[in-house]
């Protein structure tokens, strides 16, 4: 459960997001005959057969040979057999022939089952934002792969033990790539604010490890890139430097970074930053950015750039959060929450719940090891949900940024007026639908 | 005047010398089809065509006219994909997909001649059913559609005793069978059917 201290800390965070720097604010049938199961849902060449005369081996063998059975294994717990058919024998026709035999009680294909992942992370039940976008069904399809990384350009991440900094406890199974700190040019992109760690945790907090909360693309790797200082402030030049570091990064001759998350923004258009975004997209990297938290008409930059995915926020009611900026550049909404509301009436504020360290302890005592789970709201919290979806889509096989953006847009749940609108964009992201792709006629 | 000429020609064909004795027949066929919705089919199945199989039967009159009814089945396998728009790259997503297209037709036509090789043509109408099944992480998704369809056929029959053979080409179309969603909606391809070529074995009791 969330400690009272965490709830208090959430209030502190609300106070912090009211600081004057724009970059920091973006956190705030009945059938006589059963229909044949679809191809791919059963083991080819195998049939399960239940016999009324299971101990009459001569009859069993005669029946099974009659349908092309070449091997059979009897269950240790009853009169059923797992039968291997001769090569090229149709499972459907074998089942039909067996069902017509008087000695056979039933016959069916050997269906394939798969685990429906419900993570054992104890605070997952409080992550309404993951349920809002169908995270469990998403994980049935794709959980990510460390060969695909998301760069978090932010205040850094609590990803290593270095100097006064400590690795956050629920990053135990998370893979990190070499980071970059644009302020000192080093590879130590440690978080001295709290914001970057919270954003990164939405993407890939270690999941199904019996600890803390979950991340949406927990199988993917993270790259920490520190472009915002301890106040959550940075510059267009610094963010551009961070993007170029990501674009030029190589590991074994490849660049595993396929997504950049920018939970930050400024008030005017920058040629420098816009060109950096173009270089990233040209390099095959999807760039996701937060729309801004002023509740105004006007998407912040670089979210307003034509080649980014501009993300606004929903609250717990699946409506646009009151603070989420609107405009023609807005692409989609994702859960950003509202810590002033408790629409699920569970006694906790409806912020996005992820791990980070206590910003109060950090600011006052210079300690970056006081980790807990914190509710935070903002388009900053919405954007990493979309960055995670982009990483999952890349892992699933969509490798072009424009296609990833179109997949996310076209599968969103339409909110507000029918069709795209400036308040809700294409609607609320639906990762499982995006990962399912398109059939010929559905 | 084209219409009177056509009517006279058809009357002459109908009243032409008996091509053979009247008879009932059954037939089995196998061949291939190139789908009209070629972009959509290529995206999902990796090729524009698929093998086709069919069974049927009918009646051949002594005046050359014939009627036949039959069913065909095409069942290509592929995978679910994503494509942003026409001309955009296609990305395979690995979820297995099978489409089963089953046209049922009644066809009327005319068979020429009295020799060993007898050309024929015909027109038909019927219903084409479409079933698409895909499995995404253990969950099956299915769509079923049925639409009116028509076709034109032409071929040559080889008569050698009670067992006969023919080769036949046909064009079929099932308007609005596709295009309700998926890749076919992206490409704006709405017609089921296509151009097919089959070899037939014909049994005459």
Image (tube, coloured by chain):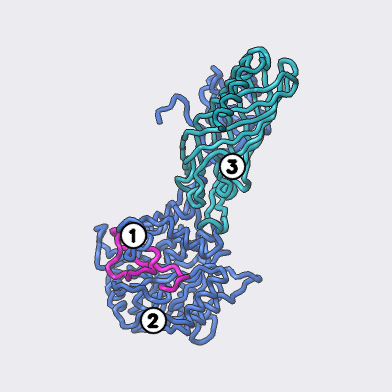
Chain colours: A blue, B cyan
Q: Which residue is mark 3?
A: B35
Q: Are marks 3 and 1 on the same chain?
A: no
Alpha carbon of mark 1 to alpha carbon of mark 2: how far?
Answer: 37 Å
* Disc 3 versus disc 2: nearer the observer: 3
Q: Nearer the viewer, residue A403 or B11?
A: B11
Relative to A201, say whether A397 is above or below: above
Secondary structure beneath disc 1?
Answer: helix
Alpha carbon of mark 3 to alpha carbon of mark 2: how far?
Answer: 52 Å
What range is drawn magenta here? A304-332
Residue A11 located left or right of residue A304: left
Image location (x, y in percent) of residue A407: 47, 58
Whether label 1 touches label 2, CB < 8 Å: no
Which of the two discs, 1 and 2, labels the residue nearer the N terminus?
A: 1
Task: Give neighbour class at mark 1: few <14, some 14-19, many 20+ (Cα, 10 Å).
Answer: many
Q: Which residue is mark 1?
A: A126
Q: Quadrant of residue B105?
A: top right
What residue is rendered at 28% in x and 77% in y? Answer: A15
Secondary structure beneath disc 3?
Answer: strand
């Amino acid at each position: 459960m969330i400690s009272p201290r965490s709830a208090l800390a959430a209030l502190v965070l609300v106070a912090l997001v009211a600081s004057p720097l724009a970059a920091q604010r973006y956190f705030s049938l009945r059938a006589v005959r059963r229909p044949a199961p679809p191809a791919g849902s059963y083991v080819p060449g195998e049939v399960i057969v239940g016999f009324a005369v299971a101990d009459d081996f001569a009859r069993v063998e005669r029946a099974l040979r009659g349908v092309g059975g070449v091997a059979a294994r009897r269950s240790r717990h009853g009169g059923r057999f797992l039968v291997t058919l001769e090569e090229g024998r149709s499972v459907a026709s074998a089942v039909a022939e067996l069902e017509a035999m008087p000695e056979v009680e039933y016959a069916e294909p050997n269906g394939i089952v798969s685990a429906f992942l419900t993570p054992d992370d104890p605070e997952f039940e409080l992550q309404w934002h993951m349920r809002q976008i169908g995270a469990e069904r998403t994980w049935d399809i794709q959980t990510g792969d460390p060969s695909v990384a998301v760069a978090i350009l932010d205040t850094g991440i609590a990803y290593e033990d270095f100097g006064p900094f400590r690795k956050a406890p629920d990053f135990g199974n998370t893979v990190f790539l070499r980071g970059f700190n644009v302020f000192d040019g080093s590879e130590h992109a440690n978080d001295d604010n709290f914001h970057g760690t919270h954003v990164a945790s939405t993407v890939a907090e270690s999941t199904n490890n019996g600890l803390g909360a979950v991340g949406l693309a927990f199988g993917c790797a993270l790259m920490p890139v520190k472009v915002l200082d301890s106040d959550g402030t940075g510059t267009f030049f610094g963010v551009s430097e961070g993007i170029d570091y990501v674009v030029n990064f190589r590991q074994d001759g490849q660049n595993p970074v396929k997504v950049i998350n920018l939970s930050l923004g400024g008030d005017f258009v920058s040629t420098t930053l816009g060109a950096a975004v173009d270089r990233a997209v040209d390099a095959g990297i999807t760039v996701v950015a937060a729309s801004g938290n002023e509740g105004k008409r006007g998407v912040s930059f670089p979210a307003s750039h034509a080649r980014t995915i501009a993300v606004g926020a929903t609250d717990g009611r699946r409506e646009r959060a009151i603070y989420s900026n609107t405009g023609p550049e807005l692409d989609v909404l994702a859960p950003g929450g509202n810590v002033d509301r408790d629409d699920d009436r569970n006694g906790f504020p409806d912020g996005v719940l992820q791990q980070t360290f206590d910003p109060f302890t950090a600011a006052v005592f210079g300690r970056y090891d006081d980790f807990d789970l914190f509710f935070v709201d903002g388009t900053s919290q919405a954007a990493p949900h979309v960055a995670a979806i982009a990483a999952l889509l890349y892992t699933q096989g969509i490798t072009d940024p424009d296609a990833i953006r179109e997949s996310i847009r076209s599968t969103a749940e339409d909110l507000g007026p029918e069709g795209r609108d400036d308040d809700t964009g294409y609607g609320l992201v639906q990762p499982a639908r995006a990962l399912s792709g398109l059939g010929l006629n559905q | 005047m084209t219409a009177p000429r056509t009517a006279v020609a058809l009357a002459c064909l109908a009243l032409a010398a008996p091509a053979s004795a009247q008879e009932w027949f059954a037939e089995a066929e196998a061949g291939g089809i190139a789908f009209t919705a070629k972009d959509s089919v290529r995206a999902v199945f990796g090729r524009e065509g698929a093998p086709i199989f069919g069974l049927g039967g009918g009646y051949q009159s002594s005046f050359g006219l014939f009627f036949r009814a039959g069913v065909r089945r095409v069942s290509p396998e592929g995978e679910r994909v994503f494509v942003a728009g026409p001309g955009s790259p296609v990305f395979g997503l690995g979820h297995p997909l099978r489409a089963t297209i089953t046209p049922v037709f009644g066809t009327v036509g005319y068979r020429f001649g009295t020799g060993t090789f007898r050309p024929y043509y015909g027109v038909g109408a019927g219903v084409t059913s479409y079933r698409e099944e895909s499995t995404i992480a253990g969950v099956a998704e299915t769509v079923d559609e049925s639409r009116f369809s028509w076709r034109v056929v032409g071929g040559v029959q080889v008569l050698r005793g009670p067992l006969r053979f023919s080769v036949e080409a046909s064009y079929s179309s099932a308007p609005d069978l596709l295009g309700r969603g998926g890749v076919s909606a992206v490409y704006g391809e709405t017609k089921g059917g296509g151009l097919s070529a089959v070899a037939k074995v014909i049994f005459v009791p």
